[in-house]
Image: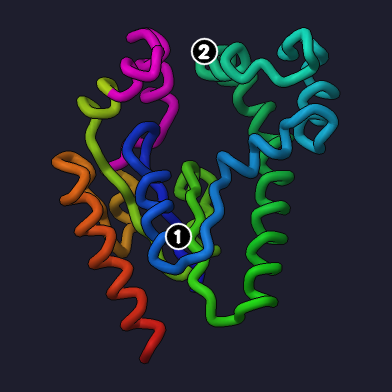
């Protein structure tokens, strides 16, 4: 079974993914796949250098993620160009990793963190969808704590589909607005329901 975990920036997707992994799922994160592919000389790194030149590289050759991140949230055309070259590579790696897992264990529950699940119409690739929602107030607080300023936060939030829209596609919604224990309890109930579904 393929399960997608999605939601907005800083809403708790990665936390929910880790819990599912703890309870027995195989887990993948498209953000982590993107990071791996954008290491020096890897496929996405090469594609970015070919598309944009070396202006987004640090002196040691690594990608300057902060500079690129700030640029794409200001410049929509730049973001589209980056998405055009990065999405096929990331999705190719995701599908390869899923295929490897399913070859080893055909009945595995594979949970994938997919930030742009709805925006890129990837929801059709998954059996079940979990949306994690914290709300804009908590998003802003968490992003401020991460070191972003109000301007950058506003740009990032404006660039994403509102999580309330993503809820339309959800089989389950995890409300990550209270204590973490409450969020974990909701996630555990979903995991139990997935187990019951597989057992049928």
Percent across and percent down for residue 15 are: 37, 45
* Mark identifier at residue 105: none
Q: Nearer the viewer, residue 79 or 108?
A: 108
Q: Secondary structure at mark 1?
A: helix
Percent across and percent down for residue 148 are: 40, 13
Magenta stretch: dominant secondary structure = helix
Label 2, label 1: how many angstroms apart (C-alpha)?
A: 35 Å
* Mark identifier at residue 74: 2
Q: Nearer the viewer, residue 186 or 128?
A: 186
Residues drawn in magenta: 142-163
Given contact means CB atoms under 8 Å apart, are the residues at marks 2 and 1 in contact? Answer: no
Q: Is residue 56 magenta?
A: no
At horizontal 54% and vertical 81% (from top left) the residue drawn is: 107
Percent across and percent down for residue 179 are: 15, 42
Q: Is residue 146 above or below residue 55?
A: below
Farthest-out residue, front: 22
Local packing at callout 2 (Cα closer than 10 Å; few below 14, some 14-19, many 20+) is some
* Mark identifier at residue 21: 1
The reply, left or right, for residue 103 in relation to residue 14 is right
Q: Is residue 148 magenta?
A: yes
Percent across and percent down for residue 147 are: 40, 13
The reply, left or right, for residue 186 in relation to residue 154 is left
Q: Is residue 166 above or below residue 151?
A: below
């Amino acid at each position: 079974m393929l399960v997608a975990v999605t939601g907005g920036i800083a809403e708790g997707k990665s936390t929910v993914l880790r819990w599912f992994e703890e309870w027995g799922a195989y887990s993948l994160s498209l953000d982590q796949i993107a990071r791996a592919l954008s290491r020096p000389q890897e496929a996405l790194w090469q594609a970015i250098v070919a598309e944009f030149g070396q202006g987004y590289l640090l002196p040691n050759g690594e990608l300057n993620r902060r500079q690129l991140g700030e640029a794409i949230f200001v410049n929509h055309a730049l973001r589209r160009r980056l998405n055009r070259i990065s999405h096929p590579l990331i999705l190719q790696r995701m599908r390869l990793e899923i295929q490897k897992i399913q070859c080893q264990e055909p009945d595995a529950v594979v949970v994938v963190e997919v930030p742009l699940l709805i925006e890129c119409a990837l929801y059709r690739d998954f059996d079940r969808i979990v949306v994690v929602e914290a709300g804009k107030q908590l998003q802003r607080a968490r992003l401020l704590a991460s070191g972003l300023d109000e301007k950058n936060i506003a740009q990032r939030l404006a660039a994403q589909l509102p999580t309330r829209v993503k809820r339309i596609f959800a089989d389950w919604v995890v409300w990550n607005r209270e204590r973490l224990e409450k969020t974990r309890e909701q996630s555990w109930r979903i995991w139990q329901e997935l187990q019951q579904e597989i057992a049928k």
